[in-house]
Image (spheres, coloured by chain):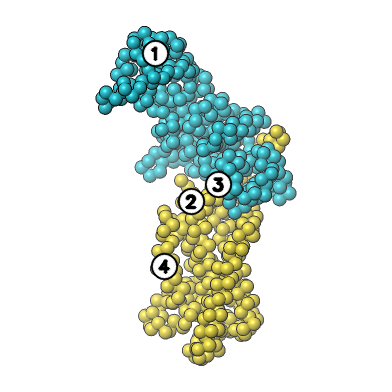
Chain colours: A cyan, B yellow
Amino acid sequence: MISARGLRKAFGEFEAVRGIDLDVRRGEAFGFLGPNGAGKSSTMRMVAAVSPPTDGELRILGMDPAVDGPAIRGRIGVCPQADTLDSELNVRDNLVIYARYFGIGRAEARARADELLELVNLTEKAKAKVDDLSGGMKRRLTIARSLVNRPELLLLDEPTTGLDPQARHLLWDQLFRLKSSGVTLVITTHYMDEAEQLCDRLVVMDGGVIAAEGSPAALIAEHSSREVAEVRFGSADTAADAVNPHERYAEQLADLGDRVEVLPDRLLVYAADGDTVLEGVHARGLHPVATLVRRSTLEDVFLRLTGRTLVD
Amino acid sequence: MTSTDVPAGSGIPGGSPGGALGTLTALGRLSDYWVTASLRTWRGSVVSAFLSPIFYVLAMGVLLGGFIEGDPDRLEGAPTYLAFIVPGLVAAHAMQTAMAETSWPVFSNFKWNRVYDSMVATPLTVRQVALAHLVSVTVRITLICAVFVVVTAPFGVYATWWGPLLGLGVQALTGICFGSLMYGYSCRITTDAAFGVLFRLVVFPMFLFSGAFFPVANLGPVGERLAQLTPLWHGVHLSRMLCLDTVDGPVALLNLAVLLVVTAVGVRWAVTGLERRMAW
């Protein structure tokens, strides 16, 4: 569906995407995971055939966006990061008018609008103004709009940013259904749980390059341990000097796991068995104020690869 | 799950190789948006578009004009001040309306409500999106000017029945001439504060001093020449000649040529401006 080799996007001196290679296969859910400014949205705009690449080779549905932009855009759906809904139009008209841009006849456009409102549970809001919708409803309407041309490939740029947990889960459910109906999904996100839930395969992006690629499980297996023990020490222990005192504890715990990461407020000890790590901490006479043992996530992979957390 | 059971990719009518649409096809697809959006917001535009010029005509043409002697020699051939002011005022109003419609609304469409972003995510191109907006502005201006002509006709200001019809075309051309220039300007600024400067320092003085309210000969030789350099003067002058049936052939052709050339430059400036703006 998508093939890129050495893809670059520069804005003057600033290089947002610095030579990436990609292959997205039909029917899969593919993710771009990375923090803000990683180059995810710039890549998505190139894939959406609205932003010309500065350099490199890009094929979407077998076509060159520089030559076949309108044909490509006719066969893909785009759910942009910011809701670009028209507040002058009501909910249903936003879909009907958008369908007209694809050359869909008026009667067919109205029928599709009603079907899609049903799909995203907005039928009762058909006549409402867009401004009266909640954030989650607007997002669902934007996704409905991106489906109006029955796309083969759906691009979702940060689909759940700013939504409450309930709205996120509702959207994930709808995206699962789309995938099972054969639509190829490409998703950007800085939420590692979203990437793990939705994506068959993903790339971790940072600073305009791809840091790693694979399935969520394979990335975790390759770049992290099975479990993580999180250890937090109290302010009485940490106020002694200006340097983050967790650094001091890190040295004492270094041999308890495969690796130790120091965050401003806690230590992460990577090991096959987190409980054994905690037993070792207590055996050394240390008394953390809070501990937690959990499985490794993509957040840990990202931390390992870039030295930074996903959401600052 | 109902609608997405339809096979993916089955939704698009066939197109040409490369998928590029003809301009007319694209304008047709975009017309639904502009018609629907206009119908939803017509109440807001009634006051500024229709009532303001009528207030101008009553206040300046009828009431102030009552104190001004109707001398065709001093009023570029108009028998009364009302007959003098109406054709020029409509052209100047067309300019102001078109510039208002292509300033904040255009800026908003790529900066705030991002309507253009949604349009160009479809088979439509940036060029087609810009042209469709300019066409919709032209249609709006033509309608506004037409209402103006109908309202002012009973005052007996038009010398012939066909004059105001041709004048209507000139007024609309004057409007889109400036509308396209403003469109290109809107695409090239970084903050909307730039509109305030332009409107206060360029548009409003031009509105006052380009011959709509008084003959530019009153500005003195230098002022007259300066006023005649503005495309608005050409629009006002041609509109007035047509409405008063005082057409001077060569001058009329010059007026028309200036308007057409500036409009052509303006449309190009507008399209390239939006193309640059959307290519990030």
Q: Residues within 10 Å of mark 4 (few under 14, many from 20)?
A: few
Q: Which mark is residue B200?
A: 4
B45 in relation to A21, above or below: below
- Which type of secondary structure does the marked residue at label 1 adopt? loop
B74 in relation to A128, above or below: below
The Cα atoms of the two marked residues, 4 and 3, are separated by 32 Å
**Disc 2 or 4, which lies upstream in sequence?**
2
Query: Residue at coordinates 46% horizontally, 46% vertically from top-left?
Result: B280
Q: Residues within 10 Å of mark 2 (few under 14, many from 20)?
A: some
The Cα atoms of the two marked residues, 1 and 4, are separated by 68 Å
- Residue holding disc 2: B111
Query: Which residue ends up furthest to the top in the rendered image?
Result: A283
Query: Residue at coordinates 40% horizontally, 76% vertically from top-left?
Result: B226
- Which type of secondary structure does the marked residue at label 3 adopt? loop
Mark 4 falls within which chain? Answer: B
Residue B141 found in image quarter: bottom right
- Rendered-image quadrant of the N terminus of chain A: top right
Amino acid type of the residue tagged 1 in the rendering: Asp
- Which type of secondary structure does the marked residue at label 4 adopt? helix
Name the spot of residue B113 as percent of width and height, x first. Answer: 53, 50
Residue A183 in view of the camera? no
- Residue holding disc 1: A258
Mark 1 falls within which chain? Answer: A
**Disc 3 or 1, which lies upstream in sequence?**
3
- Residue holding disc 3: A84
Query: Which residue ends up furthest to the left in the rendered image?
Result: A241
Q: Residues within 10 Å of mark 1 (few under 14, many from 20)?
A: few
- Which type of secondary structure does the marked residue at label 2 adopt? helix
Amino acid type of the residue tagged 2 in the rendering: Lys
Q: Residues within 10 Å of mark 3 (few under 14, many from 20)?
A: many
